[in-house]
Amino acid sequence: MNVFYEEDGGFKIASIMSEADSSMQVESSSGKRSKIKTANVLMRFDASLAGFMEAAQAEADTLDTDFLWECCGEAEFGFEALAEEYYGGKPSRQQAAAIAIKLHGAPMYFYRKGKGHYKAAPDDTLKAALAGMEKKRQQAEFMARMVEQLKAKQLPDSMAGKLDQLLYAPDKNSLEWKALDQAASELKKLPVQILHAAGAIPSIHDYHLGAFLREYFTRGTTFPAFSLAELPAELPLSEVQAFSIDDSTTTEIDDALSVTPLANGHTQVGIHIAAPSLGISPREALDHEVMKRLSTVYMPGHKITMLPEVAIRPFSLDAGETKPALSLYLEVAADFTIVSQRSCLERVRIADNLRHDTLEPYFNETVLEQDSGHPLWAPLVLLFRFAESLEKARGKYDPTRPQPVDYNFYVTEGIVSIVNRQRGSPMDKLVAELMIAANSQWGLLLAEHGVPGIYRAQNGGKVYMTTKAEAHQGLGVAQYAWCTSPLRRAVDLINQRQIISVLTLQPPVYAANGDEITGHMRQFDLTYNAYNEFQTRMERYWCLQYLIQEDMAEVEGTVWRENLVRLKDLPYMTKVHSLPVLKPGSRVQLAIQHVDTLLMELDCKFLRLIEETGEETAADAAGDPPVAMVEST
């Protein structure tokens, strides 16, 4: 005797070897013996095992599922009963098995109700299920077409309107993403590479920028409607003639300086800071936007300003104009000691906006002792000597200390030039030291009056932000509050409001121990770091683009440590896996094998050693960071 039984979701046949109450020992046609439950047996038969299942399956293939469904009615039924009705009499064992196979293979049509028993699906349910199956079939065909198009470097029409989502925030349940992911898997590439090959990324620069904008400027970079406050009616006019020193690309001029001889032989040094807080009312529309942006975003060839142009221009210290300013005046003796200091809110005439590139030939290390012919040579030299005195007072003066290199990126119509200049030039030191002095003095002013501000502090090598006046060990000052860039940083704008409240004897805008100023500080710290990381990323992009633009096959570099190499004349560091063991500071020649601005990858191969450094130089190089990390003033 043989049995037709169900096991592991399918049907099998075997010969009975022995049988107990609830189980039996059986042997398949291949000779394999096993134990099965009697409850799983659907049918017993005497026919030979050989060819039985093949014949049953062949018969099942001839059966029409729709016709079976129409025949079975609404009541629950057994497969043998349906077989008898379908064949118009007692069916053969193979015919009965064929019916069971067909029913079992059409779960949308027939619901299982127990061993060998089924129930026909309701008409509306079946139609819905069939429609769903047809939809899946069409989707599968649709996906297959998209995959083939992508593999052929063609962008499917359905993806054209979803590129932003596919690039930055893919819906992984969407057919477009599944097709893109499948194509990437088959080609062993990343999805973004597949889209780029299909022409979906016309500008790699804009692709990187778009990722940043999507995260930090979800509503775009335009400003909401706002109004500026009226300026105070009677701001006194200063008698000084101020000038600024900035890079040629600077359009938001926050700070200016002035030098005025005094009758007692001393010199009055003025540090004048733009006063946009006079026009931006706290907690109103523009201020809300400022506290979202928190800083100007910088990148080569472009920037996203913290303030709109119509709010920058009335306060930017532009040449030939008179602008409101928060001024710090230092009375400086002949030996450059500070005799007294005072702060005030006033209007200041801006005589000139000096630019690095045009000023440097007239004001550098070689012309400090002899008039270079620049109209402001004498005031500039005095300010430089004063700056040196301030640096010495901070305990940071060291003329032998190597100065890091600054890299300026200039992008015009997609062509980039990267200009490096040694930091620590007279004009750099002049501006930096005077801004440090202002930030320290105004931080002290707030602390002395018990008015909260936002400070940068450093303790044990860790730099952090705080609302308390704490020492900044790296700068060598007792307190350091960012105050000198209110057109570009929200922290400076907040501190300016607090300073003005002290000078005008008004209640502070931000209360002591309040959640508002602390919240702004914490959010600024996170956002400012993210902006700096983005700027670094875009500078790396333009470094790679520069290598492509100049068609460079080889490049010189300096070993920093292990297999990390700094490229010559570029702020770019890369791993060179083929680099032999060399001392830090060693100069090497590299072959450029592959540059990928999309994935931000540079693949270089070691060619030869140019010069191996000495032990002392190696130790110095090993201690240097890959990018100079200094406090921005």
Image (cartoon, rainbow, N blue to C red):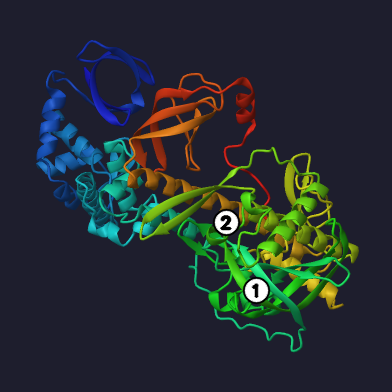
Total numbered badges shown on the rendered structure: 2
Residue at image position (37%, 43%) is: 547
Residue 23 visible (yes or no): yes
Percent coordinates x, y for residue 457 in the rendering: 77, 50
Residue 18 visible (yes or no): no
Q: Is residue 231 above or below residue 84?
A: below
Q: Which residue is mark 1?
A: 287
Residue situated in front as seen by the camera: 55 or 578: 578
- Residue 333: quarter of image: bottom right
Mark 2 secondary-structure assignment:
helix
User: Where, quadrant-wise, is the N terminus in this rendering?
Assistant: top left
Residue at image position (57%, 37%) is: 626
Q: Is residue 147 above or below residue 34?
A: below
Please name the amino acid that badge 2 sits on: Glu
Residue at the far front in the pictured view: 370
Mark 1 secondary-structure assignment:
helix
- Residue 442: quarter of image: bottom right
> Can you tell which of label 1 and label 2 is closer to the viewer?
2
User: Where, quadrant-wise, is the C terminus in this rendering?
Assistant: bottom right
Q: Is residue 30 above or below residue 524?
A: above
Residue at image position (77%, 84%) is: 236
Percent coordinates x, y for residue 437 in the rendering: 78, 58
- Residue 555: quarter of image: top left
Marking on residue 184: none
Residue at image position (31%, 38%) is: 185
Residue situated in front as seen by the camera: 138 or 188: 188
Q: Which residue is mark 2?
A: 360
Please name the amino acid that badge 1 sits on: Asp
